[in-house]
Amino acid sequence: MTALPPRPVTLTGQYVALVPLAPDHLDDLFAAGGGDAEVWRWLTGPPPRTREELGGWMGRLLGDPAYVPFAVVHRASGRAVGWTTLLDVVVPDERLEIGWTWYGRDHWRSPVNTETKLLLLTYAFEGLGMGRVQLKTDHLNERSQAAIARLGARREGVLRRHRRRADGSWRDSVYFSLLADEWPEAKARLTVRLAEG
């Protein structure tokens, strides 16, 4: 199968629905994580302290064709509780990245991240025919590294002095990947983990 470029679609699971990010999600998103420095600690730039600042971040994301952003909607409440994106898409090489992901703190250590990644990985491998999905995080963000490893992704290496943090210091980026032939086993594990809550 020749890989296809991702497009804004709705991906629905038991706990979350991933819907194309839109300005209508701003109030929910600010309520979920706006002004919470810990939620934004590992993302590029200062944490959005106001609804307008978060709207600025959202506007830049929506205005950049390099990103396919999704609002993560908690199905039980019907509210957007974070966002995630597909980026660094190279269709001829059958690869993309999942990143720029955050959730409100109330949804950490819940099924939200597991199902979000299950939906995105299923879409990437089975819907788009990708051969490689990569994820990256700050080398100091141990919580994120552990979560990525639990997806079944393999740690590949570290890009040193890769990106400047909001405070001006330099981060090293830890790269992980999952390949198409590894996906069936990873999908089975994620499905079991999601069923266990």
Image: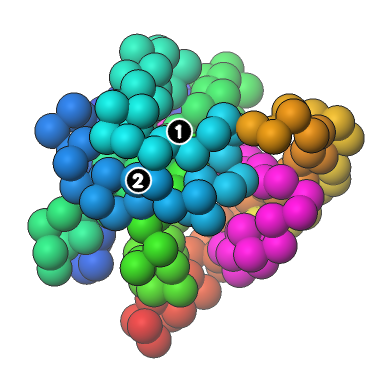
- For the residue pair 83 and 105, the one nearer the viewer reads as 105
Asked where in the image residue 192 lies, by quadrant, the reply is bottom left
Q: Does residue 42 show up?
A: yes
User: How packed is label 2: few (under 14 Cα within 10 Å), some, or many (20 or more)?
Assistant: many
Q: Position of residue 88 (x, y in %)?
A: 56, 24
Which range is magenta? 128-152
| Residue named by callout 2 | 34
Which dot marks residue 151? none
Picture coordinates of residue 148, whole percent (x, y): 61, 59
Question: At 71% across and 46% down in the image, what residue appears?
Answer: 138
How far across and down, in percent of the image, does residue 113 sit? 42, 61
Name the side, left or right, on which 141 lies relative to 5.
Answer: right
* Residue 180, visible in the rendered structure: no
Q: Residue at x 13, y 68 (%)?
A: 76
Compared across the picture, whether 145 is left or right of 57 comes to right
Magenta span contains residue 151: yes
